[in-house]
Image (tube, coloured by chain):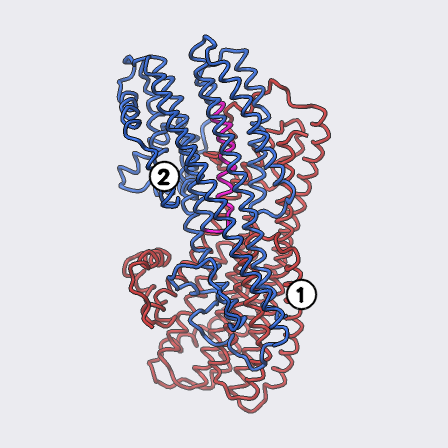
Chain colours: A blue, B red
Amino acid sequence: MPSGLRFLIAAKRCEITELQQLARTSVLVNAVGRLIHGLQRERGLTNLHLASGDGQWAPALAQQIEDNATLQAAVVGCFEAMDLPVSRLNHGARLFSRIAYALQGLDALPALRNRLRSEAWSAERATAAYVRLVGGLLAVVFETADAASDPGISRRLVALFNFMQGKELTGQERATGAALFAAGQADAAAQQRLLRLIDSQERCLQVFQEFASPALYQAWLLTQRPEQQAPLERMRRVLCTAADGTPLDRQLSLAWFDANTAVIDAMKSIEDQLAVELLTLCESRIEASAAELAEFEALTGERALKPQADSDLSFFEPSPSDASPDHQTQTLAPVSPSGFGLQVDRSILELVQAQSQRLQAMGHELDTVRASLNERKLIERAKGLLMAHRHLSEEEAHKTMRQMAMNQNRRLIEVAEALLAMADVLPAPQR
Amino acid sequence: MPSGLRFLIAAKRCEITELQQLARTSVLVNAVGRLIHGLQRERGLTNLHLASGDGQWAPALAQQIEDNATLQAAVVGCFEAMDLPVSRLNHGARLFSRIAYALQGLDALPALRNRLRSEAWSAERATAAYVRLVGGLLAVVFETADAASDPGISRRLVALFNFMQGKELTGQERATGAALFAAGQADAAAQQRLLRLIDSQERCLQVFQEFASPALYQAWLLTQRPEQQAPLERMRRVLCTAADGTPLDRQLSLAWFDANTAVIDAMKSIEDQLAVELLTLCESRIEASAAELAEFEALTGERALKPQADSDLSFFEPSPSDASPDHQTQTLAPVSPSGFGLQVDRSILELVQAQSQRLQAMGHELDTVRASLNERKLIERAKGLLMAHRHLSEEEAHKTMRQMAMNQNRRLIEVAEALLAMADVLPAPQR
């Protein structure tokens, strides 16, 4: 068999293995999403339970905790299934490290629940604990999106991650607003947090819009019913604009909670559809790649009999589909996932060039998708830098960066890059 | 064993597997470098042979071809060793696809040599064929640098790739200049190519300077001996400034060839030192990671006996080394590759957080290193776009972009990004 063909086949097998990993990852992400949803409900019920003080929410909370045990077992099962083929993952070390962190949180969950049963924690403190737990699980999803090597699948994973993150921010907004209404008094710090949560939700949904399939974006838009949105936005306005210390209508607490819960539940159904779409996409890509592999393998029999002519110098001739390391993807045509067809007459060189071009184009597309994840990382790092160096809260850091972007008429990512570039010259964090 | 610890260990094992792959890759890169050097010599001797016409270079050429067979066998051996653990590589599909292309070229090499023996090809045409072959091999090296997941090693691979690329450009400059002197007449097109080659060499060496260890950069500077540089720069000036069609001193052809050969040979010795340094680095990183793994594994025995206290809520407490998905790397301290030490008293949570922070910081550092590879890709893509859409030669496209950068006072990469952003609105390439 010509050695080029052998590596063409090896490359195709690699692609299939990576796609199979992505399919497993999609199953994992879906299981994590279900658990997160359960924990979000548990967090909400805990808040209601702590706020009411009369135990009316205790049975619902107990039921949710029981349901969550099942969801958690499913996630841990997925984690353990990943642990086996240790070295077969892209960015395996980072993903496993995220999983280790998430598992630490899940292991500590019974202790948290015990504490919440025996001690009167504030709703805020309880919320913060659940936020941390969900954050650890979302980090696992983020890492899977960052590791995906197929641009089409990576796009959907980025859409899904941002949607899940947006949903979690909605959950946090629900908790913050419910506590504010329950307290009956406007509070500037909580207001800042609310503004940050709303702002971040919008950023997540923009990325979702950019990377989701049009069909699912439409499905999401359809869940945005005006009769639900209007009262919610009215309550948001009240919460966000009331002067510090002025009274708030305590009665609105439950209405606010329920309205946000309806939004979160609608988001969950979209999230499930995203997960199904993702898995379907993985499967169809695996099928297409397997068909291509079969074509390549069929060639080995024929080509073994017809060795390359000794006079064949086509490798050395410049061709429009030049696969040299440079300039090779000047083509602007969209990349067909199954671009080979049954052209057994084509030379192996052409197949190699076509595959190489296709992989390069996929690489460029992947760079574009990853850029959005990278922006997110940079913005969060810049925020962390501000928090550490200026002793700011997350809200204050967020606001400072927004303000800088507005004043300088620059994008948030540009402000973040400028801040990070200055990191070396900043004084060490004050302790 | 606590499940967090298990995944901490899995993450460490992944890291070690990736480092072992990198060590194998380093061996491959070194073998490829040797073959490239041999092919560069073969190309040079072929040029001399074609230019002299009297067969005086035939024995040296025959000897070089024989030597190259050995070097080629070593490279193919490395390729085949990689083929086995198909799915264990990052970006395996892209690397294998590059290898398939390079092998197509090596398979066609005997046909090329036959043709060169039997037909009077021009030196230019012969050079172009070898340039293509070497380009295919360099693309393999580029891909390994792009796939490396350890930032320290990735830095060295990027330095090495750019150095190898710079050396190849020097080889092309040698051939172009030698042909010009031999022709005895200045030629505007060849002059443009020369300017492009010199310019690109400098770009490569800048990246080399940025990413090489200070020791090796110093070693490279020491090879730059003024008594060699001065006559070479004088000849460069003559070649680059002579008016189109004016006579050139034919006698200088061999002096030019020899002076460049001395530079290339000096570069080869630096390249070998780079390869040794790379392998040493891989080995020391593997050793450090293995020691950390042993520490973690030692913990499993102890911790299995001391289960996490049910009241341990430390996961839910905000800590300065917060490992939530966001803001977690506000630390500006340099990352120690073996930052754990023998602190068995530290909780597993702290170990998980430390490892997660370390991997994140490595990820950020890696992004920085990859940015330089990405710049290269974008510049070459933009060049390819200009070539395709305006029917420009590589030299013309290069010059156009340089000019745009100068006129707009922007960096070359910014011009490239602007061009690529316009790609969608450009008319389709003229055929």
Residue A167, image quadrant: top left
Q: Disc 2 designates what residue?
A: A219
Helix, strand or loop at mark 2: helix
B50 relative to B12 in the view: left or right = left
Query: Chain for mark 2?
Result: A
Residue B70, image quadrant: bottom right
* For residue A294, above or below residue B393: above
Q: Local crowd at mark 2 within 10 Å, few (<14), some, or many (≥20)?
A: some
* For residue B210, above or below residue B321: below
A14 relative to A33 in the view: left or right = right
Q: Disc 1 designates what residue?
A: B77
Tell me, yes or no, if residue B214 can be seen here: no
Q: Amino acid at mark 2?
A: Ala
* For residue A129, above or below residue B132: above
Helix, strand or loop at mark 1: helix
Residue sitting nearer the eye, A162 or A256: A256
By secondary structure, the bulk of the magenta-drawn segment is best described as helix
Chain part drawn in magenta:
A129-151
Residue B121 position, x and y percent, is 50, 85
